């Protein structure tokens, strides 16, 4: 018969506390999930739902539309401008007589005047300023589309991360359920041994205490599941009470290419580098705009006037005139030849800064890809080690189970071997999920997370 120094009264207190917590949590969980709708979902479906219902992506789409309209406004600047106006004026002349020596001039007591103006103006040449303005706004529109691409990748990764987090919690809960079932068998067996006088009551209590600890871990996992499940429902636009089920995830043993291949892909795909190129082009356009200040301008204009001094606004022969003017206006602010050079120098510095910024961004991307690449390799290696650890823990558990039945090992040793196997099983499931997420993290850093 085995000896155990565990205090039976202390174990009873722990068991009572854990049992009470377990009953309360089970009641709360049952009440909360009674009306919940279950939904099995794959990673592909999760991404489709999340991207389709993302409010952030809808906002990014609105920003693109805004940038397109700004580009259209820049194009409109090249269109002719026109203006039309028509006004009426009445003048009262109380003192209407002018004396010039023996002669005098009498004016009417009142006078009416109608004035209408119609003008049309067109800029013919403005030093290519309009061309550079259109180019800049076009580049900014492209940058807005790249912003939307970055947002889409970020949101997709957030969805994938939440999906894997939920999978990890569900796998942990599954392992807990398996171990509780196994411990129930151990408790029945130890109770049988106790009834036969082979073991002490402490041996039975030891297995019951281990089961309580496992159930306590299960309560914590269930709490995490509800939090992650709720957050994922919000991301996907699903009813908040939907209970998501993930039966399995993709295998994590994806083929690994050379690090240089991932870096080359990132340098050719990442929107940050494309935006850096656009920023350099915007700087070039800005230089052209500033240089255009030294160029002469040429504009054409046409104006038509209607002047009527009668009281009746309807035109009558002899009461109105309609002068029409057409002209060209050339102007040149030649003072810009010596006042503009420092503005050009500043714009060239901004262009240089754009190149330096791109170089810094490229280095950061290389570091990010390398870190994620190494993390993925390490995650795969960790899975191999944990698979070996599970095999060893399983063999050790079988040996101690046999020894315990033969009354060679104590209940504490038997429970410890079960705990080691239980922990190894959880660690493996977590490692598999971490490896899957590490793979998608690597894809994100290359700019190829989503097509």
Image (cartoon, helix red, strand yellow):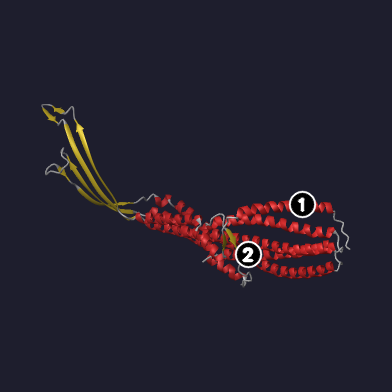
Horizontal and vertical percent position of residue 127: 36, 56
Q: In the image, which is nearer the foreground, mark 2 or mark 1?
A: 1
Q: Nearer the viewer, residue 304 or 225?
A: 225
Task: State left or right for residue 345 relative to residue 250.
Answer: left
When asked about the image quadrant of residue 129, the answer is: bottom left
Q: Residue at x 64, y 71 (%)?
A: 253
Q: Nearer the viewer, residue 341 or 194?
A: 194
Q: Nearer the viewer, residue 435 or 259?
A: 435
The disc at residue 294 is none
Q: Which residue is mark 1?
A: 16
Q: Residue furthest front?
A: 195
The quadrant of the picture occupied by the N terminus is bottom right
Circle 2 crowding by C-alpha within 10 Å: few under 14, some 14–19, many from 20: many
Task: State left or right for residue 254 relative to residue 184.
Answer: left
Q: Residue at x 19, y 42 (%)?
A: 307
The image shows residue 264, relative to residue 76, as above or below, that is below
Horizontal and vertical percent position of residue 290: 42, 54
The image shows residue 21, relative to residue 386, as above or below, that is above
The image shows residue 396, relative to residue 364, as above or below, that is below
* Secondary structure state at the residue bearing disc 1: helix
């Amino acid at each position: 018969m085995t000896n155990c120094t565990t205090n039976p009264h202390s174990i009873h207190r722990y068991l009572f506390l854990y049992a009470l917590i377990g009953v309360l949590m089970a009641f709360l969980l049952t009440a909360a999930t009674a009306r919940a709708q279950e939904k099995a979902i794959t990673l592909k479906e999760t991404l489709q739902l999340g991207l389709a219902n993302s409010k952030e992506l809808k906002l990014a789409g609105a920003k693109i539309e805004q940038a397109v309209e700004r580009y259209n406004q820049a194009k409109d600047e090249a269109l002719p401008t026109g203006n039309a106006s028509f006004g009426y004026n009445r003048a009262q002349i109380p003192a209407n007589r002018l004396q010039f020596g023996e002669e005098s001039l009498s004016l009417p007591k009142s006078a009416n005047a109608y004035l209408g103006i119609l003008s049309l103006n067109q800029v013919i040449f403005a030093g290519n300023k309009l061309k550079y303005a259109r180019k800049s706004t076009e580049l900014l529109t492209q940058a807005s589309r790249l912003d939307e691409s970055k947002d889409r990748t970020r949101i997709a990764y957030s969805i994938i991360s939440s999906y894997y987090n939920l999978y990890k919690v569900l796998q942990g809960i599954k392992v807990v359920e398996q171990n509780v079932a196994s411990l129930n068998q151990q408790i029945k067996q130890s109770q049988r041994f106790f009834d036969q006088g082979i073991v002490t009551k402490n041996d039975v209590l030891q297995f019951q205490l281990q089961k309580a600890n496992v159930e306590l871990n299960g309560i914590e996992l269930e709490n995490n599941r509800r939090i992650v499940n709720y957050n994922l429902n919000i991301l996907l636009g699903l009813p908040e009470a939907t209970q998501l089920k993930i039966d399995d995830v993709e295998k994590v043993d994806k083929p690994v290419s050379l690090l240089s291949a991932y870096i080359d892909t990132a340098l050719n795909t990442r929107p940050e580098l494309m935006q850096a190129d656009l920023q350099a082009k915007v700087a070039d356009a800005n230089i052209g705009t500033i240089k255009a200040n030294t160029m002469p301008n040429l504009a054409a204009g046409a104006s038509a006037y209607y002047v009527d001094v009668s009281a009746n606004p309807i035109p009558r022969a002899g009461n109105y005139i309609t002068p029409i003017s057409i002209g060209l206006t050339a102007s040149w602010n030649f003072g810009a030849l010596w006042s503009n050079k420092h503005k050009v120098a500043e714009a060239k510095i901004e262009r240089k800064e754009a190149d330096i910024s791109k170089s810094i961004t490229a280095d950061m991307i290389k570091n990010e890809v390398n870190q994620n690449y190494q993390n993925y390799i390490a995650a795969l290696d960790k899975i191999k080690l944990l698979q070996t650890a599970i095999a060893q823990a399983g063999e050790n558990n079988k040996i101690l189970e046999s020894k315990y039945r033969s009354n060679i090992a104590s209940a504490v040793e038997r429970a410890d071997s079960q705990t080691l196997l239980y922990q190894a099983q959880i660690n493996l499931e977590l490692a598999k999920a971490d490896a899957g997420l590490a793979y998608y993290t690597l894809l994100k850093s290359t700019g190829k997370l989503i097509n």
